[in-house]
Amino acid sequence: MPYIPRIIEDVILESSKTFKVVFLGGPRQVGKTTVLKKLAENKKFSYVSLDDLDQRNIAKKDPALFLQQLSLPTIIDEVQYAPELFPLIKKMVDQSSNNGQFWLTGSQQFSLIKNIQESLAGRVAVLNVLGLSMAEKKKDKKTNKHPFGGTYKKPKLPDVFKEIFEGGFPVFQSNNVPNRDVYFNSYIQTYLDRDLVGIFGVNKTNEFNRFIQVCAARTGQVLNISNLARDSGVSTPTAIEWINILENTMQIYLLRPYYPNFTNRIIKAPKLYFLDTGLGSYLTKWKSPEVLQAGAMGGAFFETYVVSEIIKSYIFRGIEPSIYYLRDKEGHEVDLVIEDNGLHLVEIKLSASIKDDFSLGMNYFSRKSDKFVSKTIVSLIENKISTPDKVNYVPYTIIN
């Protein structure tokens, strides 16, 4: 499989110059190990994976012996299996003035990141990566100061739903593309066995499998935890615990509401988005891009796709995205509020038309406050257009 350059490469290399440890988190099979191995070429890095049970046992039972066998600099893969290593890594890097001695990968989970940040405070750069972005698939590594500065490509409805249906896992860009259903079924089983059972100690795999399917059917919706629990057949405390697991392993993104100072009548629940639309469409049983496009969830998956691409545009630059949504109890709504040198209102529309009602929510909230500096509609429109009421229509293809 030919290597696809990743936007985050420069961030990893720069972080390695200024931090003694670099941690790269993210879901399984999105290319964490691949990008580190590519960057380590000709740099004499050693490599060890804690997916290897023998290595994992040594790391857990005798972390000092495990680290003694490594030559520095080194890559330690799947480090979440042996948090016992962190205090000794701290001791080792404190004995050297060299930066970039340890490159670590692992699933992104709250307890792991907290452990890393506490054990290696001031010594570690914590970065994240997801599946391939639209820009990376186009081989466009150019980075921009805002999400809507990518290379223009004429949008086509069949193309975007092919992208949505395929998702961002790099394996689907290989010369030997696997059967989609077989791949995602295997991915889910690996996730259940290694992460759910192996890391979180949750043994109700059948119930969790049902739960994740119900979550996928709610992508792009405000999260009602009681309804989610009821439809999944689990208790509300269990649903809360399992939502946290999905968020911490970066399978879903919970978009929190923005709280303006001009009203207290804001919906307070987050919106749920699947971070990989291919996995989400598999879990919701859509059988082709065409059926998904024509189906009841076409708009929700287009919105999910755009939100995930915007999230990638930030985290691939090493920036935690400051994005929210805005909805009040009277039904006024804006899909996204992006906090980036001001507050930017963004609507997402599965349409190539210009319509006044597309901007009703943005116009309503912008009249309430002068803090909102721009209004943008991301859609299937062919070219950038600005309307007299200062609404900017942009094609989804320029997200980078």
Image (cartoon, rainbow, N blue to C red):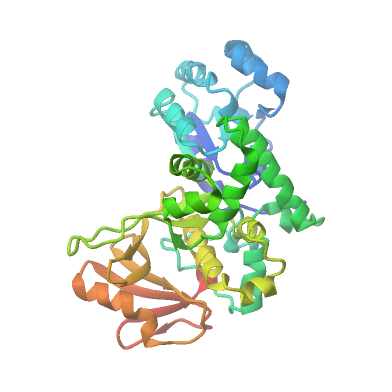
Which quarter of the figure has residue 330?
A: bottom left
Indicate the position of residue 187 as horizontal and vertical percent values.
Answer: 69, 46
Q: Residue furthest right?
A: 176
- Residue 360 position, x and y percent, is 32, 80
Query: What residue is at 21 percent from the left and 76 percent from the top?
Result: 367
**Up-down relation of residue 260 to residue 390 (above or below):** above
Front residue (pair 338, 48): 338
Residue at (46, 47) in percent of width and height? 318
Quarter of the image where one finds residue 370: bottom left
Residue 14 visible to an observer of this rendering: no
179 or 391, which lies in front? 179
Query: Can residue 355 be seen from the camera position used here?
Result: yes
Q: Where is residue 256 in the image (x, y as percent from the top left)?
A: 36, 54
Q: Name the one closer to the observer, 70 or 297.
A: 297
Q: Quadrant of residue 289?
A: bottom right
Residue at 34% from the left image edge and 74% from the top image edge: 375
Q: Please, which residue is most extreme toward the left here?
A: 262
Q: In the rendered image of this protein, does residue 234 appear above or below residue 272? A: above
Q: How many marks?
A: 0
Q: What residue is shown at x 66% (from left), y 17% (from top)?
A: 57
Query: As displayed, is residue 9 above or below residue 44?
Result: below
